[in-house]
Image (cartoon, helix red, strand yellow):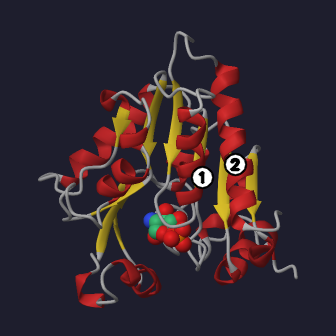
Amino acid sequence: VFPSSSDASEYLAEHIIRRINEFGPTAQKPFVLGLPTGSSPIQVYSKLIEAYKQGRVSFKNVVTFNMDEYLGLKPTDPQSYHYFMFNKFFNHVDVPRENINILNGLAEDVELECLRYEAKIRSHGRINFFMGGLGPEGHLAFNEAGSARNSITRKVSLVQSTIDANSRFFDNDLSKVPKYALSVGISTVLDNSDEVAIIVSGKNKQFALEKTVHGKKNDPSYPSSYLQDHPNVLIVCDKEAAGLK
Ligand code: GLP
């Protein structure tokens, strides 16, 4: 728990840098990094970019997999997670373009796209590090309430609270928010990752964080509670999210 979201982000960015550097820039295998979108990781990305510019980390030997993408948005749409990732992170670091993996929200055969993505993740053996955020109702990636522990990458319907929360990025116009997305599953994250880190900030995440850490274990109503089932989870938050003064 950190005094501010900036301190929490700084800590997490330094932790990721440590992990990548320990792994070694010339290791035979690439370092596999799972990544989220949303407002929570933005400062982490800024701090990683800063460290890259200072020569403290390189992403040349890193392969990335993003958690999710809206269905039906073009990669050039400013609200797509493709656009977000290139704008906030990939365009500013040395990660090779061919190492970047993001679900294709325009895929003609959605089922095939999800199977392809899941298989590509699993072909790497292990994800070294998965960073995520939390939805206010305890969703992880776009795994909404009801998602199963053994869920894999698939098409999901967004629940009303997610559509409401994300409408702030769509001119507060609910009709513009996509109703479906493609998302990695709970199993994709938990069963393939050596370490999972969740960044949480702000009072509106207090409820989700409480359910994640102290709620009933493996409660499908709050998919982030599945994190209790993973042996190596790091939660980095500010004091508002933790409910501290
Ligand atoms: C979206 C994303 C999630 C993210 C959540 C929280 O629904 N699919 O991966 O964790 O929003 O976003 P924010 O960090 O903006 O609160």
Categorize mark 2 by other alpha carbons within 10 Å: few (<14), some (14-19), many (20+).
Answer: many
Name the residue rendered at 66%, 45% in the picture: 13
The amino acid marked with disc number 2 is Leu
Name the residue rendered at 72%, 53% in the picture: 229
Residue 195 in the image, given as x and y percentages of width and height: 68, 40
Kindly report the distance in space between the C-alpha atoms of the residues bearing marks 2 and 1: 7 Å
Residue 124 drawn above or below residue 190: above
Residue 31 in the image, given as x and y percentages of width and height: 54, 26
* Viewer-nearest residue: 57 or 64: 57
Name the residue rendered at 82%, 71% in the picture: 214
Q: Is residue 42 visible?
A: yes
Residue tagged 2: 12
Say which label, 2 or 1, has the lower sequence index: 2
Q: Are marks 2 and 1 in contact (CB under 8 Å)?
A: yes
Residue 74 drawn above or below residue 195: below
Quarter holding residue 70: bottom left
Residue 217 in the image, given as x and y percentages of width and height: 75, 66
The amino acid marked with disc number 1 is Val
The residue positioned farthest toward the left in the image shown:
108
Q: For the residue labelled by badge 1, is the local secondary structure a helix, a strand or a loop?
A: helix
Q: Which mark is residue 44?
A: 1
Categorize mark 1 by other alpha carbons within 10 Å: few (<14), some (14-19), many (20+).
Answer: many
Quarter holding residue 204: bottom right
* Viewer-nearest residue: 91 or 138: 91
Q: From the viewer's perspective, is 168 left or right of 212?
A: left
Which image quarter holds the C terminus? bottom right
The residue positioned farthest toward the front in the image shown:
54
Q: For the residue labelled by badge 2, is the local secondary structure a helix, a strand or a loop?
A: helix
Mark 2 CB lies closer than 8 A to ligand 1: no
